[in-house]
Amino acid sequence: MYTPETEKEQFEKIRTLLYPNADAACKELAQEIKTLIEIRRAEGKKAVLGLATGSTPTRLYRELIRLHKEEGLSFKDVITFNLDEYYGLAPDHPESYHRFMREQLFDHIDIPAENTNVPSGTVRRKDVFSWCQDYENKIDESGGLDLQILGIGRTGHIGFNEPGSGKESLTRLVNLDSLTRLDAARDFLGMENVPRHAITMGVGSIMKARKVVLMAWGEGKAGVIAKAVEETPVESLPASFLQGHPDVRFIVDQAAGSELTRIKFPWLVGAMEWDPRSIRKAINWLSTKSTKPILKLLDEDYNEQGLGDLLTSSGPAYTLNITAFNDVQHTLTGWPGGKPNADDTHRPERAEPHPKRVLILAPEPQDAVLGMGGTIHRLVDQGHEVALAYLTSGNLAVPDSDAIKATELILDMANATEDADNVVVNKARDVRKELLKKGDQSTDSKNVRHIKAHIRRGEARAACQECDLTSDHILFLDLPFYENGRYRQFNLTDADTDAVTQLLQEIKPHQVYITGNQADPSSVQALGFETVRRSLVNCSEEDWLQGCFVWLYRSHGREWDIHEIDMAVPLSPDELARKTKGIYQHQTQRNQAPMSRHSGGEAWQQAEAADHHLANRYDSLGMAEYEAIEGFRRLEINNQL
Ligand code: F6R
């Protein structure tokens, strides 16, 4: 049983290491694997690795490939066993884990094909049981796993051991949880295409490994990580069984570690060095916990909930309450671009200059309206020069059926006007033919991706109209990392940063809005954010940047906590309805709301629920009661880029 080393980690039952980012963690883990392979080789043995698929290990695999290519690390005497495979997928299916492993690792290193093992997705149903027993035996016969690499699903699954999986379960056929299928909907272009079953190694098979390392990146994993590490092991959260493993560690980035008690409620696990933000955080928490508005909190409330030292250092409650109340109150503004001719001492944005040049950046087309549709409308309405730049076309997320519909529209118009032989019509005809015979085994050609991009442009323009933003204020950057890539295979290059840097230099904005800073690092949102971050760094010598506020908005994933918000823009019921209509224009995305921002439903329902929820949170702290609120956090250019 793990004994925490510091007071701060007192609730943690698994050794958990927080890294500044996924790359730093993967570099270290890759070195550990290298050492393991070398030690095994010196002993005349083969290293046996348990491998995972999904977004999480891709950076680790990239680093292992680098070690092979640049530092001569050989995998000739390595044996691998993969955790799982979708049942029903052939090894060449674009989403099969066989193909994933070839593309992400095996094809780039010198591992002999016969040393790699991935569960079969095509074994006949009647043979599954004995096939699984053989897989288990093969692991044992190879000497057992030296190291098992894991990711974690939002259900708490490891491998595909969904809630309900027993501690001693072995390799077997399982049903996939609906949340897991929802998370995979993006890759399969719709939840209906995601397989319902998988073959997976069991929790017991994983527990037999001599060492286990679980990786997690991005805010989407924060909740499940905290539960697995701090709560009592239960079948409803299979990863929590790892608490019983003698040599396990979790390696996580800051976002995935953000729900651990030591990060989220640090005052509960040791002495604090209080600063204004942590005071605001603690008092908001206290207000929620004791279900009282801030101004009604008493000294007793502080003492009873473990905030006695805050009371001693900065109390009494009356003083603390007033300061915290004002702090939160000052985040609220109906003037996201600043209120002209007003005293702006306590406003989140400066009054001058007015109007401001505002640049809104959307990693995927729907992000901007999801996260800040109401605020865009306000900025336009209040006379600012707003430009909205879509970083990527989002064409990978368009279902084939929508593209076929679009080609049919073009062909129909061509027939009606007897103009059946021009470049556009011929292209539409080719694309239609290609899509109809595509099947589910191949990826989209350039032509198909073009037409899909046009569909998304049309949707984006329609959404902007709901925000009163006209087409001449919209830019489509089609960044190369996305246009030349596929999910999990995106690589940022200078061409991406150059395009955004040039745009920043042209506009010289007073405000930049961007999202994705806490997202899974392989997601389009995170890569979009990283491109913008690098571009801002490129401009660090330029004068205009010193007068530029960078605002982070939320489009996916968890909501802001109130203490994280620096600007809260209330929306009236009418404004919220307009925003909803705007989101609705992204019609091809309607069945594909992957990372629910709030619980369940389509994207517009989730966004509405989240904005209502934020307004309710402000209300319950004792602020005015609004219909909905969009929250923003300011990124300090000088020390947070
Ligand atoms: C994959 C696997 C799964 C994933 C988990 C997280 O082989 O076994 O448990 O590790 O679903 O997926 P990503 O990494 O895509 O977030």
Image (cartoon, grey):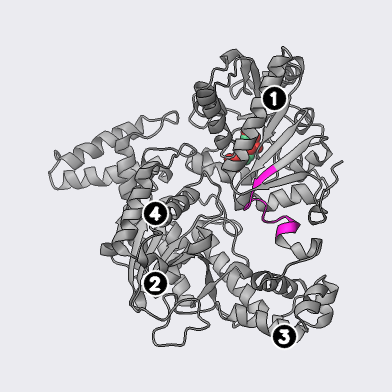
Looking at the image, is mark 4 or mark 3 earlier in the sequence?
A: 3
Amino acid carrying label 2: it is His
Q: CA distance from mark 3 to mark 2?
A: 38 Å
| Front in this rendered view, residue 502 or 418 | 502
Residue corresponding to mark 4: 538
Residue 597: give its label.
none
Q: Is residue 261 magenta?
A: yes
Q: CA distance from mark 2 to mark 1?
A: 57 Å
Dot in front, 3 or 2: 3
Residue corresponding to mark 1: 36
Residue corresponding to mark 3: 319
Looking at the image, is mark 2 or mark 1 earlier in the sequence?
A: 1
Dot in front, 4 or 3: 4
Give the percent coordinates (x, y) of residue 386: 34, 68
Looking at the image, is mark 3 or mark 1 earlier in the sequence?
A: 1
Identify the secondary structure beneath mark 1: helix
Amino acid carrying label 1: it is Leu
Dot in front, 4 or 2: 4
Looking at the image, is mark 3 or mark 2 earlier in the sequence?
A: 3
Q: CA distance from mark 4 to mark 1?
A: 40 Å
Give the percent coordinates (x, y) of residue 191: 53, 43
Residue range (magenta): 251-263
Mark 4 close to ligand 1, CB under 8 Å: no
Q: Characterize the local packing of mark 2: few (<14), some (14-19) or many (20 or more) Cα atoms within 10 angstroms.
A: many
Do the residues under discs 4 and 2 have CB atoms within 8 angstroms?
no
Q: Characterize the local packing of mark 1: few (<14), some (14-19) or many (20 or more) Cα atoms within 10 angstroms.
A: some
Identify the secondary structure beneath mark 2: helix
Q: Residue 181, located in which quarter of the rendered image?
A: top right
| Front in this rendered view, residue 279 or 540 | 540
Residue corresponding to mark 2: 377
Q: Residue 35, located in which quarter of the rendered image?
A: top right
Q: CA distance from mark 3 to mark 1?
A: 57 Å
